[in-house]
Image (cartoon, grey):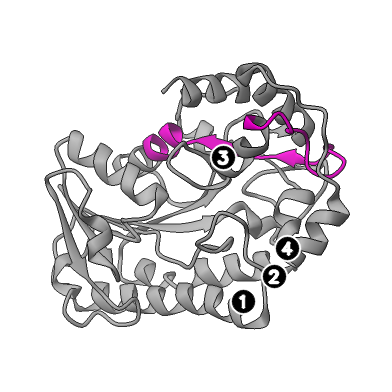
Amino acid sequence: MRIVISGGSGLIGRALSARLVEAGHAVVILSRAPQQADALPGGIQAVVWDGKTSQGWGHVVDGAGAVIHLAGENIAGDGFFPARWTEERKRRILASRLDSGKAMIQAVEEARTKPGVFVQASAIGYYGPLGDSPVDEQSPAGVDFMARVCQEWEDSTQAVEVMGVRRAIIRTGVVLSMQGGAFTRLLLPFKFFAGGPMGNGRQYLSWIHIADQVEAIRFLIENLGAQGAYNLTAPEPVRNAEFAGSLGRVMGRSSFLPVPGLALRTMFGEVATVVLDGQRVLPTRLQQLGYSFRFAQAEAAIRDLLRS
């Protein structure tokens, strides 16, 4: 089938595009910087869009088997270290999601043949910080900045359901990949024998291996009963200190030098809450639907990534 992916040149989009092409699908990615798509595997078509309207690209949605909407400004910024959430950055983070959602709705409205399924990206930030309490898809939305962003992000494409299109929402946790994202940032201090937990280390880390992220999205596309919200996190979230211990063991490094929470909040401001508050999120609906995780335990995931 033909699959259209917004944000296809990002961390998840690139891995997903490659896997879908490998599985025999034709992939069209929407990108505001198509030059970033130069290194993508053959069989992937890059189409320019502005992330605000369907002008010039909306036709690619017509008759598509699936549309996967991943676009949105990176909450941590584009640099190696997280960017502070200034009021202007908060505005851009939210606007990038609402504007692109509006453009996707416009494209689906214009399509004579509606897509078979629409996959809407979101994040586990939807639930807000809840400490040690286990969280699944039945848990209510939080009230902090990220929770509000996720709620509006999800709502931005709800109209496709009125058009008769099946919609699955993916609330993604911390994606572990050697190609970027949080994992490469976590590795750095361990490489210099200075690794350890963030803050007090008791907060939960809800993670997912990039391979499971990709396969879970494929699973939701192909499963006609998949509709509504799904947590894309491994079934065994771990405390931050436990994750640091696993990372240290696999790398043969010490893991007892904590990064003080106060220092993180001073350096990065509100964005530090993403790693210091933590969430214990479970993929209940995904497992009930029959998805089997390739990497359910953090240490096995870390070993696989570092071996590759």
Question: Which residue position is annotated with label 4?
Answer: 268
Q: Nearer the viewer, residue 175 or 180?
A: 180
The answer to which of marks 3 and 2 sits earlier in the sequence is: 2
Task: Report helix, strand or loop for mark 1.
Answer: helix
Spatial CA distance of label 3 from label 1 is 23 Å
Task: Report helix, strand or loop for mark 3.
Answer: helix
What crowding class fits label 4: few (fewer than 14 Cα within 10 Å), some (14-19), or many (20 or more)? Answer: some
- Measuring from the top left, give residue 33's x and y in whole percent: 28, 68
Tell me whether the residue at label 1 lies in contact with that at label 2, contact meaning CB atoms closer than 8 angstroms. Answer: yes
Question: Which residue position is annotated with label 3?
Answer: 183
- Measuring from the top left, give residue 19's x and y in whole percent: 27, 37
* Residue displayed at 67% across by 77% down: 86
Q: Amino acid at mark 4?
A: Phe
Tell me whether the residue at label 4 lies in contact with that at label 2, contact meaning CB atoms closer than 8 angstroms. Answer: no
Spatial CA distance of label 1 from label 4 is 14 Å
What crowding class fits label 1: few (fewer than 14 Cα within 10 Å), some (14-19), or many (20 or more)? Answer: some
What crowding class fits label 3: few (fewer than 14 Cα within 10 Å), some (14-19), or many (20 or more)? Answer: some
Task: Report helix, strand or loop for mark 2.
Answer: helix
Question: Which residue position is annotated with label 1?
Answer: 90
Toward which corner of the image does residue 234 lie, by quadrant? top right
* Residue displayed at 74% across by 58% down: 272
Residue 251 part of the magenta-drawn span: no
The magenta span reads: 191-216
The answer to which of marks 3 and 4 sits earlier in the sequence is: 3
Spatial CA distance of label 4 from label 2 is 15 Å
Question: Which residue position is annotated with label 2?
Answer: 145
Spatial CA distance of label 3 from label 4 is 18 Å
Toward which corner of the image does residue 249 lie, by quadrant? top right
Tell me whether the residue at label 3 lies in contact with that at label 2, contact meaning CB atoms closer than 8 angstroms. Answer: no
The answer to which of marks 1 and 2 sits earlier in the sequence is: 1
